[in-house]
Image: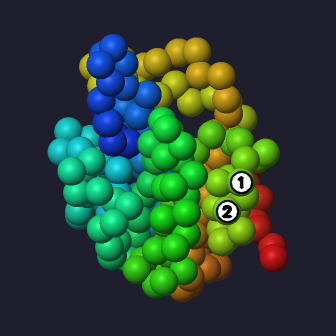
Amino acid sequence: MSAAPTAYTGSLGREDGRDSDSWYTPASYLEAGRRTLRRFDLDPFSSATANAVVQAERFLTVEDDAFVTDWSGPAVWMNPPYSRGLCAQAADRFVQQYEAGAFKRGIVLTNNATDTSWFNTLLESASAVCFTDHRIAFVSPDGKAVSGNTRGQAFFLYESDGRAKTLERFRDNFAPFGAILEVSR
């Protein structure tokens, strides 16, 4: 199976031609997310190219500015940008929109940086988390798998309605990728 470019996290562009925010999620993880949430209504850090595979009803580009645009729709997929401290801002925005009721269900893919404040911000509102037992080979904008990822990843599940059924689907769909832990508060 070829790696299709998916889950673009929003390019800020750089003069040296490198773009640390252009990391696409491999299709197998997106398929697991769609089976869990049933669909993606919003991908807040995306592009038209990425959305061809993400298949969100609506996506926000850098120009749309997910940090100020309201998020709406029952289910959100988020793979946040990482450059210039944007991951922390994206985590804060996700949780703020979730707690405000802009959406009912969501999945966030991040590095498993348990020592960061943004990771703990995400964890505090999550229903469950999957810690991968491997490092994801993300896909570059040219469609090639990128080796050399130095961190493991985590998928956070958010569910405010029908928690038991969505949690069961999350376990079924993400267990092949690693350990699933339910978050208790």
Rounded to the nearest angstrom, the CA distance separating label 2 from label 1 is: 6 Å
Task: Give x and y (percent) for residue 23.
Answer: 41, 32
Q: Residue at 65% of width from left, 22% of height from top?
A: 150
Element type at mark 1: helix
Q: Around disc 1, counting alpha carbons within 10 Å, would you say few (fewer than 14), some (14 to 19), or many (20 or more)?
A: few
Q: For this view, does 54 lie left or right of residue 130? A: left
Give the residue at mark 2.
Answer: 121
Q: For this view, does 117 lie left or right of residue 84? A: right
Q: For this view, does 103 lie left or right of residue 96? A: left
Task: Give x and y (percent) for residue 180.
Answer: 73, 55
Q: Is residue 63 or residue 149 the one in the foreground?
A: 63
Task: Answer whether labels 2 and 1 touch (C-beta < 8 Å).
Answer: yes
Q: Amino acid at mark 1?
A: Ser
Give the residue at mark 1.
Answer: 117
Task: Give x and y (percent) for residue 82.
Answer: 50, 39
Quarter of the image where the N terminus is located: top left
Q: Residue at 61% of width from left, 80% of height from top?
A: 163
Q: Around disc 2, counting alpha carbons within 10 Å, would you say few (fewer than 14), some (14 to 19), or many (20 or more)?
A: some
Element type at mark 2: helix
Q: Residue at 53% of width from left, 15% of height from top?
A: 147
Quarter of the image where the C terminus is located: bottom right
